[in-house]
Image: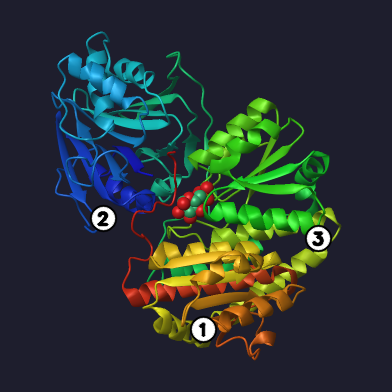
Amino acid sequence: MCGIVGYVGKKNSSDIVLDGLKTLEYRGYDSWGIAVNDNGKLDVFKKVGEINIKKVPLPKTSSAIGHTRWATHGGVNEINAHPHFSTRRDFVLAQNGIVENYQDLKGKLIMKGYTFDTETDTEVIVRLIEEKRKSNETLKDSVRDAFNELEGRNTVIVLDSSKEDHIIAVRNGSPLVLGIGKDGIFLASDALAFAKYTKDVVFLDNYDLVEINGNEFKIYDAKSGIRKEYKVTKLNNKIKGISKGKYSHFMIKEIVEQKDTVLKAAEYSEDDLKAIIEAVRNANRVYITGAGTAGFASGQIAYYLRNIAKVDALDVRSYDFETFLPILTKNDLVIAVSQSGETADTIEILEFAKEKGCKIGCIVNVEGSTIHRMSDYKYLIHAGPEICVASTKVFTSQCVFGYLLAKSMVNEYKEAKSYIQDLSDGLSDYFNEKSFKHIKKLAKKIKDNEHFFILGKGQNSYISLEGALKVKEISYKHFEGFSAGELKHGVIALVEDDTPVFSIISDDKDSKDIISATEEVKARGAFTVGVGDSKFKNESCFKYFLPTASNKELSGLANVVAFQLLSYFLADSLGNSIDKPRNLAKSVTVK
Ligand code: G6P
């Protein structure tokens, strides 16, 4: 949901900011813009669409800010793109978030004679700072005063023209990380944006205000205005610049990486897991929560905890958690599942849970993210940066961690590790031209259909939901996943001649039910596709079969990979944008 970058230093600032924005495009790619301070004159370059240029036509300077937008207020055009000028063009500002009281503020500013050029809520912040300048000596205090009147989760960055190399930024809700390098000081929504220049970072807290003046910076508490101490953290050395390598898209690269990432997620010793095992054991109930793909991973993890460890574990989508708050007690444990660790709905629920006195655990991919920092039990899945908006490797990693946890609770840690190794080996064998060809052939066959259904049960129940989500995100086709048991209660009414129906089948107790459900849709003319254990490939109910790296208790995770590949090849054959699908953003930091 929008990416922010700022830089002051020896290098050409617009190059650094452009490079950073390219890394942050996963956060929004409607439009983008960069502003530089050229000897006291601010120069802005904005563009609609993805960032596809190597250099911006801006003068060489030592300070710049930039923004990549995922529109919330106001259409996608250059006027609404950030950064936004102040009326006197003496500062520019970019924002990540939503000013929830913007209409109220705008009304008051209009009464005072301010005019607005854009439809954004961002411009309200700009004008409010202008208003605050009347009663404040410094731009920093004006930004602070204005910021304290904003409602909602907002992070802003301001470039000043009155002083050389002067940037002010304030964080609330949406992430902001400061990087301290030998060639300059960096600010970004994600440390990835500058990870190739420095590993020394300060993860800013909510209401931290940073002021960069040349090669120095100071951090203040935005509420009180008092100077704050800060902690410098060393980023994991392995985080480097990101590239697609030999692949044509990040999505396929990330899908294939799963043969390794499933192992990385399980690189925890029994000792490392003790704290969370203890917390799960002592909890009255364990709530697992997340949104989107992370919400489905929560479902799969809760399934493992219930069915393997016999724990009272319930998954609740974070955006719906409010309806569970009346029964949440301080003896419950809430575990958040999130790739970014910055999803607004999930953070909000954790804040409520903390207020109730609950302990918080997390299964996240981004170190130092808000959810990571606010948790009592922190577990990183070490999947490495995931760039494609549609999540693949992170889903399987989160589930693998949940599986390892559940197995460890019943003293089956070693068995879990060996099954995870089998999954990794199975995936290594599976990623070959032959499997890809088979899936591509299917993609070609079904690409003109509009409606698709996916049946799952037991360990494949959430896989059917995640499988459907994956395909719809990239192919824009209507895919619906549901539990096979639901079929007769309505969905079967939608099945007609040639409707593709996918049935996920593992070698487990649910296979019989899946076969019966498939027979029922076949009898109504469906084009039935089995996805799963090759043992079933000759079952007469299936008209097409996609064998997977199906693997005992982790069969569901092997099966989801087939849908990730189907999604990829289907979107490719339709000519869709794969890594950046329309309307979506990878990190949803606004509500
Ligand atoms: C967006 C992304 C999904 C992701 C979800 C939750 O919808 O497109 O891929 O699963 O947000 O994000 P999180 O960072 O919390 O996993």
Query: For the residues carrying marks 1 and 3, which lies nearer the camera in this image?
Result: 1
- Please name the residue that numbered disc 2 is placed on: 51
The kind of residue tagged 2 is Ile
Q: Position of residue 198 (x, y in %)?
A: 43, 45
Residue 369 visible in image: no
Of label 2 and label 1, which has the lower sequence position? 2
- Crowding near the residue tagged with mark 2, few <14, some 14–19, many ≥20 C-alpha atoms within 10 Å: some
Q: Which mark is residue 177?
A: none
Residue 257 falls in image quadrant: bottom right
Name the residue at the right extreme: 411
Which residue corresponds to the image point at 25% horizontal and 42% vertical from the top-left?
Answer: 13
N-term mark: 2 or 3: 2
Residue at 48 percent across and 45 percent down: it is: 199
* Whether residue 363 is visible: yes
Q: What label does residue 525 carry, if any?
A: 1
Residue 477 versus residue 53 in the image, above or below = below
Q: Which mark is residue 413?
A: 3
In the displayed structure image, the side of residue 331 where residue 100 appears, left or right: left
Residue closer to the observer: 92 or 564: 564
Above or below, comparing residue 226 to residue 102 in the picture: above
Mark 2 close to ligand 1, CB under 8 Å: no
Residue 513 placement: quadrant: bottom right
Q: Residue at x 76, y 49 (%)?
A: 273
